[in-house]
Image (spheres, rainbow, N blue to C red):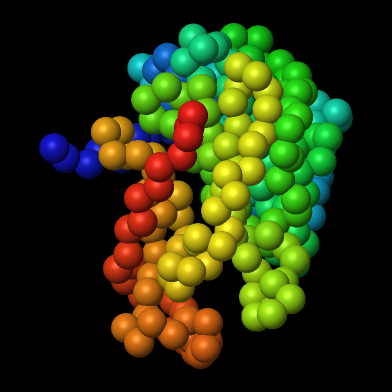
Amino acid sequence: MTWERVITLNEDGKPSLDLLPRSGAGSIIVDHKLFVFGGWTRASDERYTVGRNVNSFSVLDLHSRIWIVKDRPYPPEVGTLGYNISIFAPKAYQGWKLVIIRNKVEDDQPIKFDDNFMWIFNTKTYAFTKQENGGDIPPPHAWADICPHRESEKTCVLYGSINEPDSDSGELPSDLWSFDVLSDQWKCEGLRQDLWDLDCDLQTLEHVPGRGWCLLGYKQPENNRKKKKVAAEQDYNRTWNVCVTLRLENA
């Protein structure tokens, strides 16, 4: 197994260098095409950006390595999808529809799960339609990580910190919500206290086929996260040393 740099091309066969640079974009591969949505940038281009957010999508044909769509602006009704966007392709949609869930729009603002936070994207027509959702819709979050079920892909699970400090500790509590694309319903899994009792800094959610849902993160050697904050300089580049496996009913 080797790495290969993919040199993308324009339609004239020359190397393509004119996509807007960005970080935190959402991407997915469907039917040998790479779909790229949003992200944030320090570049300034009023056609594609609002503040730091890139409000466009691009499509790369992986066979020809040609960008068949380059930074096409979102339609007005979509607004911005922010950065660190979550995208998954439910098998029930047979690859021609993607579910897109908006994430962060501003660093200092919570993620709001309002009427415009979920969209369906048609991979054939490139049209956006609003995804209906009901049930226990998540409250505003300081941050969130969203992952699809890797086997059925009819479900995704959201994990993150609720943007409302705990009254006793002052910290932001975490919980999980699952979403079923067939019923359009969110469900709170009610694991807030269980996650708190683990006394870990869990940061990333992943679904591992044959094992289930896993939360990856860090636990201090002295098991005292609630009593003693980690110094700011120690928050970066630390090694994850904890994997918590979850059993979620119907997810």
Q: Nearer the viewer, residue 220 or 42?
A: 220
Residue 49 visible from this viewpoint: no
On screen, residue 143 above or below 221: above
Left or right, 207 with respect to 251, comes to: left
**Extreme-left residue of the structure:** 1
Q: What x and y, as percent, mark residue 47?
A: 79, 39
Q: Nearer the viewer, residue 232 or 209?
A: 209
Q: Nearer the viewer, residue 240 or 174?
A: 174
In percent of the image, x 60 and y 22: which residue is there? 181
**Extreme-right residue of the structure:** 76
Residue 231 visible from this viewpoint: yes
Q: What x and y, as percent, mark residue 74?
A: 75, 30
Left or right, 224 with respect to 118, comes to: left
On screen, residue 27 above or below 152: below
- In the rendered view of the protein, which quadrant contains the N terminus? top left
Number of numbered discs visible in the structure rendering: 0
In percent of the image, x 59 and y 26: which residue is there? 180
In percent of the image, x 46 and y 63: which residue is there? 202
Q: What x and y, as percent, mark residue 107?
A: 70, 63
Q: What x and y, as percent, mark residue 182?
A: 61, 17
In percent of the image, x 54 and y 40: which residue is there? 157
On screen, residue 164 above or below 5: below
On screen, residue 190 above or below 217: above
Q: Nearer the viewer, residue 133 or 223?
A: 223
